Amino acid sequence: MSKSIANISGTCLLVLAAAAAAADGSLDAGFGQGGVAFVTPDGNDIHEFRPTTAATLADGKLLLGGARNYFEPTHPWEPHYRPALIRTNADGTPDTGFGADPANPGVVVLPEPVEAMGMQITEGMQVLADGGIVIAGSAFVRGPAQGFVMKLHADGSNDDSFGERGLRLTPQVQWHDLAVDSQGRIVVCGERVGGVSFPRGVVARFLPGGEPDTAFGSGGMVELLRTENGAVLEHVGNLTTLGLLPDDRIMVGGMQQVPLPELPENNDFLLVRLNVDGGYDSSYSGDGWDLFGADWLTPASGADSVERLLVQRDGGVLFAGHYDAGDSAYKLVVGRRTASGAPDANYGDPLLAGFQPVDVLPKAGSQYATALRQQSDGKAVLSVVTGVFPERSGFAAVRLERHGTPDASFGSGGIALFDIVPQGAYADAMSLTLQAGRPVLVGHAKRDTQSNITELVLARLDNELIFADRLGD
């Protein structure tokens, strides 16, 4: 295997789409090689790429956020993940004008937010109108967890006008998602993992210069706490995803423990809407809290969680998550709540009041949504990770009609599933972006089972309708 990132190769086996016609959901032959592009680390300073988020830039280039890892020969099991950005040209080849490492063109490894921490990974990213980049993530392992927010110039260098040399740290939290509101304020969500009995969901807002926004919550932060008779209920909670309404109200999603007599460890889907000042928005679900389960199941699922959400133009919220389908099998479900927080009875399976289960790969033990985007025609597109031990996972995308049913014109019954490393160990679709209407799946893959190299992989899918405005990116 080549050790140069400049060598782009692609090997693909289309599993659920016909090769003869360019049907929606089939690999786009105009991208990479046969629709797939691999970016290979040099095997010296970088051994692994782990992408977590993706965006399409105004010129059609792709910007990917996540982390890189390298292995010390004497301690190959120890993690050395550092935040990283990768930029490719529109066709998936590395952008040689980004970064300064000839062995890894197109890659910018960012300064360590917290020195010597083992895991330092970007999870949220937004590209600003002026080309600047804001990222959020977490540093943990070998020290107390800290959340970080960084502001960067378009070339990946630190923007020193933000925080301390472009960095803002928040101790005892982990950040999982980020958005920038109409005032340039940065909103992040995640969970508090230190100084409390149980993890709990938190939302923070920072001013454009990086200072905590004291007009939001308490000192710039809101902890999602349920109370009973004036006492805080010490229940586990976390937040994985957020979205903003046009007036800068905040919608967050994740999971919350809701003990049941027969199932004390029960976790429910969680959606919460906050006012601009961080108070709970009582116009949503009565008190701002929307807790619900996969109630169509018998016995009830005890492990429900929202992974991704999208605030829609009417104020409703589209979400993707998972539920426990029994035998420890976690299945994908997409749902919609109205602007008032009620299940949308016109969405999804008519018998399930606002839910649409999607079984991407029936034999998979787990199915998780890693990104949720909306096309300009209102159809939703998701990237999905499937776990099939001990077999390889599938590189998967799902498309749903506006009313939530699987789109029969996409892939096979709404599901596009690919085995892009037929001789390799795995390939996982970790994010998704829309490039002029075409879905681009972004993930990592291990093609050589005997190597310690994990590559970045991108796959662009055909879409008959090409939307120049890239709504949802």
Image: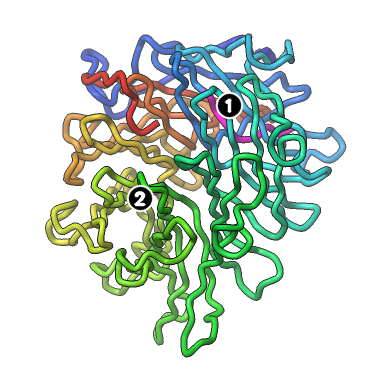
Q: Is residue 117 magenta?
A: no
Q: Please provide percent x and percent y for residue 330.
A: 40, 57
Closer to us: 352 or 390: 352
Helix, strand or loop for disc 2: strand
Q: Are marks 1 and 2 in contact (CB under 8 Å)?
A: no
Q: Which residues are magenta?
A: 63-70
Q: Position of residue 76 (x, y in %)?
A: 79, 38
- Residue drawn at x 35%, y 35% as measured from the top left: 397
Distance from disc 1 to disc 2, alpha carbons, whole Å, reads 29 Å
The picture places residue 207, in percent across and down from the top left corner, at 60, 45
Q: Which residue is mark 1?
A: 132
Locate residue 274: give its quadrant: bottom left
Q: Is residue 1 visible?
A: no
Q: Seen in the image, is 5 located left or right of residue 461?
A: right
Mark 2, Cα crowd under 10 Å, few <14 / some 14-19 / many 20+, is many
Residue wearing tag 2: 320
Task: For label 1, count other residues whose C-alpha is less than 10 Å away and answer few (under 14), some (14-19) or many (20+).
Answer: some
Q: Quadrant of residue 203?
A: bottom right
SS majority, magenta: strand
Image quadrant containing the C terminus: top left
Picture quadrant of residue 208: top right
- Mark in the foreground, 1 or 2: 1
Front one among 276 and 436: 276
Q: Name, please, the residue furthest toward the bottom.
A: 229
Considering only vertical position in the picture, is 31 above or below 385?
Answer: above
Task: Answer whether residue 49 is visible to the viewer in this image.
Answer: yes
Question: The residue under label 2 is which amino acid type?
Answer: Ala
